[in-house]
Image: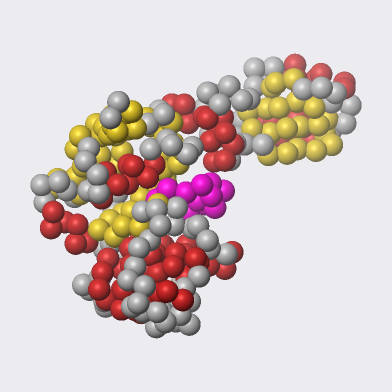
Amino acid sequence: MIKVKGLNKSYGKNKVLCGIDLNAANGEIVGIFGANGSGKSTFLKCVAGLTSCSGEISLDGRSLSENHSLMKDVGVMIETPAFYKDMTGRENIKFFCPDYSSAQQYIDVLAANDFIDRKVRTYSVGMKQKLGLLIACIKGKELVLLDEPFNGLDVISLDQADKLLDICKKKGACILLTSHMLEHSSGLCDRYYLLKDGKVVPNEELLKFEKPRYSVEMRSLQAKEKISALYADIITDKPGKTFEVVLEDADIEKRFFFALSEYGFSSVKDITDTLESKYRIMEQGYEAR
């Protein structure tokens, strides 16, 4: 388990991270999202020990800063992966990963056999990204830190990367990742944190956008008036025969949809906030509704 408490980081007078508290369990994928400059990459660098910071960072209850030997089981891919270009991909893996036993399984999952024995200088962007993922996941038996791991990957490669991370997760690794591909990442992560201005957006703010929400169009204005009178406390009026409704309770939801069928409706659309829409709302100061 990775636990971060009171993490602060400044570059001169510019405070980049402000008292970050975060935790992630073994066998869990946790996303860290935010706008450019929100501190995502800097946060991962702090955890990886690549830049100085203040605060507490522990892995399975042991301080990472005081127990450097723990880093042998931490896999890191931050910003642009760097390799020995005159070595093959396989040679790079063997150089960076002392334990090569799981390597071939991971190579197969990423369909990297076609290029893994070629020199890295011949690799495309996507091939280099796959190699970076391989090294991070093979080395990261305890913790994997991934900064924008899906950059340069096509649709098929994205599926392969998901399978690779799932294997790491099932083997008990804790995975922290940043990504701008919010729609893709939301289905992959068990949990996520949003960073804004160097701070974690409070959970109570995120919960505002978790409730099931629907846009409903009734068959007539009369039908809309009748159902609006019954559920005035959860309905928001919209032009014409439409309205929006928030359904927090399963019993209310059941009664509401029964009433819809009784009065007659034309359409019901699920407009519950996606991770991407939540992100937009957060970046606009919680007022884009």
Magenta-drawn stretch contains 274: no
**Residues shaded magenta:** 177-188
Asked which quadrant contains residue 172, the reply is bottom left
Q: Quadrant of the C terminus?
A: top right
Q: Nearer the viewer, residue 148 or 118?
A: 118
Q: Nearer the viewer, residue 207 or 102?
A: 102
Q: Nearer the viewer, residue 76 or 194?
A: 76
- Taking the image as drawn, is residue 268 in sight? yes
Q: Please give the name of the residue rendered at 84% of the width and 36% of the height, measured from the top-left corner.
A: 266
The location of residue 258, given as percent across then percent down, is 73, 34
Magenta-drawn stretch contains 183: yes
The location of residue 200, given as percent across then percent down, is 38, 32
- Taking the image as drawn, is residue 251 in sight? no
Q: Please give the name of the residue rendered at 57% of the width and 64% of the height, measured from the top-left corner.
A: 154
Asked if residue 203 lies left or right of residue 12, the reply is right
The location of residue 277, given as percent across then percent down, is 59, 36
Q: Please give the name of the residue rendered at 25% of the width and 73% of the height, measured from the top-left corner.
A: 95
Asked which quadrant contains residue 225, the reply is top right
